[in-house]
Amino acid sequence: MRAARITGGLGALVALVLLSGCAVNERDQQASALSGTIDGAGSSAQASAQEVWIAGFQTANGSATVNYDPAGSGAGRDQFLIGAVAFAGSDAALDPDQTAGDVGRCTAGAGAVDLPLYVSPIALAFNIAGVDELRLDAASVARIFSGDIDRWNDPALVALNPDAALPGARITAVHRSDDSGTTENFTDFLHEAAPADWPDEPSGTFPYEGEAAQGSSGVASVIRDGVDVIGYLDASRATDMGVAQLAVGDDFVKPTPEAAAAILDVSPMQSGRADDDLVIDIDRATDAAGAYPLVLVSYVITCRSYTDAGTGELVGAYLDWVASEAGQDAAAQDAGSSPISAALRERVQAVVDTIG
């Protein structure tokens, strides 16, 4: 049993942290055998959740320190692969060939795995003068972000929104300027759900010109400050914005945690990977009732084993907390994510138990 396998007590402790509003580096020194520092980097979508997870973990382990730099998924993957950080957060999994062989700080030949620990809808947030509710389908989203639809009163948008007073203003569609897992998930949705209107293969770099911003926070700022603008970002960053509903089957679905969880229930694991490399093949073109297909499954990328045993112990203990029911609930409460299901948590925990 790992030294910090104390998730029940840790859940109570993190609740106290959240209620008291303690900062990440303000910790109650708890008795723990763990000590040392580990660094992670990557997904900006995970940033708020990582703050919550770090606060809870450090509260329970007063001599342990976890640092996380939300530099973006591409930067996080790159830093992990060269050994600059012990773990990475990424909105897109490593390619299968990147997980094998000698990787970063991993024991020679052990390789790396992807663990789905942060789940959230990707919101299509908007700021349109006089419009409080917006309905879109995959084809219209693809045409807006490719530039094929450039005004809000385009007939395709009016047909989807017969009761909205859509203006004749030009659309400003903002995308991520950095190499982003959120962009890769967004373009994967468009390519699968509207291939005729988005023939481009999924990519972490946006394939068209237009307004661009760095990170989720940059996109959020453009939307808040702009007029007649729309952009895609993690739903936890869009709580004070107008958010579009997406057509799924005969209904329009909001980007809620429940709808994000529903799409995972109808999606298989990606084939061609090791059994412990838990990458989900999201069914973007689903017509399942209540499921929201524009969802972000963000991974923590970790070694199976580390060249430094102390690093392995700390990473394993930290992810033991992150994957726990209490850790997932804490992130849902404070970061707006969707907790992974009990069945998925069991699979993730089985992998975490072997990290060392």
Image: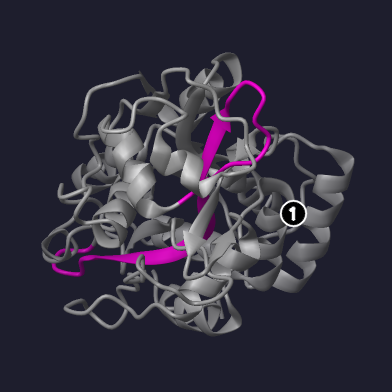
Looking at the image, which residue is at 56% across and 29% down?
166
> Closest to the observer: 319 or 124?
124
Residue 298 lies left or right of residue 272; in this view the side is right
Residue 162 lies left or right of residue 212; in this view the side is right
What span is colored magenta in the figure?
A: 107-136
Residue 303: image x %, image y %?
31, 62
Residue 155: image x %, image y %?
41, 38
Q: Is residue 119 magenta?
A: yes
Specify whether residue 31 is in view.
yes
- Three-letter amino acid code of the residue under disc 1: Gln
> Closest to the observer: 260 or 319?
260
Q: Name the residue tied to disc 1.
A: 333
Query: Relative to 194, does residue 211 appear above or below in the rendering?
Result: above
Q: Quadrant of residue 163?
A: top right
Give the SS element for disc 1.
helix
Q: Quadrant of the N terminus?
A: bottom right
Question: Magenta region's main secondary structure?
Answer: strand
Q: Quadrant of residue 204?
A: top left
> Closest to the observer: 246 or 29?
246
Residue 189 lies left or right of residue 253; in this view the side is left
Residue 297: image x %, image y %?
43, 59
Specify whether residue 37 is in view.
no
Looking at the image, which residue is at 35% across and 73% down?
278
Q: What is the basis of the colouring in this image?
A: one colour
Label 1 crowding class (10 Å Cα cut-off): few <14, some 14-19, many 20+? some
Looking at the image, which residue is at 49% across and 77% down?
288
Residue 225: image x %, image y %?
58, 14
Q: Is residue 172 magenta?
A: no
Query: Relative to 152, does residue 157 appear above or below in the rendering?
Result: below
Q: Quadrant of the C terminus?
A: bottom left
